[in-house]
Amino acid sequence: AQSVAQPEDQVNVAEGNPLTVKCTYSVSGNPYLFWYVQYPNRGLQFLLKYITGDNLVKGSYGFEAEFNKSQTSFHLKKPSALVSDSALYFCAVRRGWITGGGNKLTFGTGTQLKVEL
Amino acid sequence: DVKVTQSSRYLVKRTGEKVFLECVQDMDHENMFWYRQDPGLGLRLIYFSYDVKMKEKGDIPEGYSVSREKKERFSLILESASTNQTSMYLCSSRLAGSTGELFFGEGSRLTVL
């Protein structure tokens, strides 16, 4: 079975400071990893993904994430936070190179990011 | 712009009622998914469909059924709504066999009284 852990329910950071939202995963074989963001009363929006290749992936709105295979982590980062980054962030994983039943995406429980002035 | 449309943003139903949640995508995606979102539990997969008339159970299918008669439409059905089905329901779609991301609708917030 595959799973995702987001150990922090909430992360608080001051505007202009760097932010990190943590994610660890468990999956058989090679992982496909994703980050999504959700603003209040809205659906999820895709931020970035890791499929293969460079461990540092860049995505929308200045976000990036680093894939670390030995630590089974995929932490989301941004060098300088904005108040408008305040939202709920979800990490997700699925098995790579698998079709059919293994194609399911499993989400973490989400981390609320609060950026204050 | 690609789009996943959920017809009802907010619904209030009574216990025992039959509830239909409709989802339409305009991207010609084969795969479609229904999740429910609850605070502290994240997103949990209810049902998914690889293609027209195909469906598979997700992690929490009890109390739900689905219908996929056309490629663009994936319906979630609550045969007899219960209060523990009060939740946010999210529909999503993706190209088959792709490494791409899921595209989500805006969500349907269902309250069962």
Image: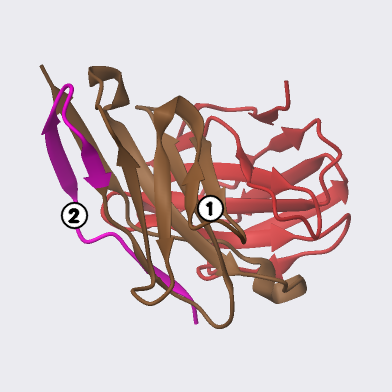
Chain colours: A brown, B red
Q: Nearer the viewer, residue B69 or A23?
A: A23
**Magenta highlight on residue A5:** yes
CA gap between label 1 and label 2 equals 22 Å
What range is drawn magenta here?
Answer: A1-20
Q: Which mark is residue B35?
A: 1
Judging from the image, what secondary structure is the residue with disc 1 in? strand
Residue A45, position as x, y percentages in the image: 51, 34
Residue B41, position as x, y percentages in the image: 32, 58
- Side of A115 relative to B86 (left or right): left
**Magenta highlight on residue B75:** no
Among the 4 quarters of the image, the one containing residue B73: top right
Classed neighbour count for the residue bearing mark 1: other residues with Cα under 10 Å, few (<14), some (14–19), many (≥20): many
Identify the residue at horizontal 59%, vertical 33% (top origin).
Answer: B105
Q: Chain under label 2? A: A
Classed neighbour count for the residue bearing mark 2: other residues with Cα under 10 Å, few (<14), some (14–19), many (≥20): some
* Type of the residue with mark 2: Glu
Q: Chain under label 1? A: B
| Residue linked to disc 2 | A8
Judging from the image, what secondary structure is the residue with disc 2 in? loop
Vertical side of B60 occupied by A59: above or below: above
- Side of A48 relative to B41 (left or right): right
Q: Quadrant of the C terminus of chain A?
A: top left
- Side of B41 relative to B30 (left or right): left
Vertical side of B26 occupied by B68: above or below: below
Q: Nearer the viewer, residue A63 or B11?
A: A63
* Type of the residue with mark 1: Tyr
Q: Nearer the viewer, residue A40 or B20?
A: A40
